[in-house]
Amino acid sequence: MKILTFENDFDTIKKLILSGELLCSPTDTQYGLIGNALNHKSIDAVYKIKKRDRTKPLIVLFDCIETLEKYGIYIPSKYKSFLEKIWPGRVTVILPLKIESPLKNLFERNDLAIRIPAFKPLRDLISETVPLFAPSANIQGEKPAAGCNECKRYFEGNIKYCIKGKTIPLPSTLVSLTGKRPEIIREGAIPKETIEKLLAEAEKEE
């Protein structure tokens, strides 16, 4: 497995993403498997390599809220201020997809788990390429990789590249905005109390 860095190999990483390669990469939370979220083959490959149940969604990373609108992701007006406060940040939000969204067919879903990461190299990469899926770097059921050594142990022979970097041990906090009321599905890097406070503030502003 070849080791890359964002500092020295940014242009190479861009080309690999656009060509459909999967890479182990640091994110603003744990190490992830990043790839082109607009490429069917890349999506199929990450499910196969992770041995992941196809019913489990992949987190998809974007560079800014304006890009979400470009890809037909529905942003409830009531919670736009909430999203503006948490992003970029370690909160993943499940949002509905509009009928015309190209992501509906790609991911075979009516909603998508989305984050704008608090890690500028990733946002820069997305800005210059495409949205990136980024599930945790592990085989389903195993502990998430903490670095390139563990990525190599899990994926040697299936993934050729690992981007070196620092992460935190916690996953993102996961919030759903697809129902009548917001639901905190998983508490992670951002405390539940912080999310509840920001959601309440957004509702008061409406």
Image (spheres, helix red, strand yellow):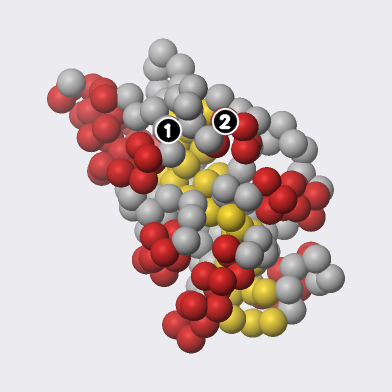
Residue carrying label 1: 72
Q: Quadrant of the N terminus?
A: bottom right
* SS for callout 1: loop
Residue placed most toward the observer, 205 or 4: 4
User: Going from the N terminus, do you reach mark 2 or mark 1 first?
Assistant: 1
Q: Quadrant of the C terminus?
A: top left
**Residue 39, image x and y in percent?**
63, 50
Inter-mark Cα distance, 2 to 1: 9 Å
As drawn, the residue found furthest toward the top would be: 180
Residue placed most toward the observer, 7 or 183: 7
Judge whether 193 appears above or below 44 on screen. above
Question: In the shown orientation, is residue 89 left or right of residue 57?
Answer: left
Q: How many marks?
A: 2
Instruction: Tell me if residue 114 can be seen.
Output: yes
Residue carrying label 2: 104
* SS for callout 2: helix
The disc labelled 2 sits on which kind of residue?
Lys
Question: In the shown orientation, is residue 84 left or right of residue 92?
Answer: left
10 Å neighbourhood of mark 2: few (<14), some, or many (≥20)? some
Would you say the residues marked 2 and 1 are in contact, meaning their CB atoms lie under 8 Å apart?
yes
Give the residue displayed 30% in from the left and 44% down from the top: 66
As drawn, the residue found furthest toward the right would be: 157
Give the residue displayed 61% in from the left and 70% down from the top: 16
The disc labelled 1 sits on which kind of residue?
Gly
| Residue 181 placement: quadrant | top left
Give the residue displayed 52% in from the left and 46% down from the top: 60
Residue placed most toward the observer, 73 or 116: 73
Judge whether 111 appears above or below 25 on screen. above
Residue placed most toward the observer, 187 or 123: 123
**Residue 85, image x and y in percent?**
25, 43
10 Å neighbourhood of mark 1: few (<14), some, or many (≥20)? some
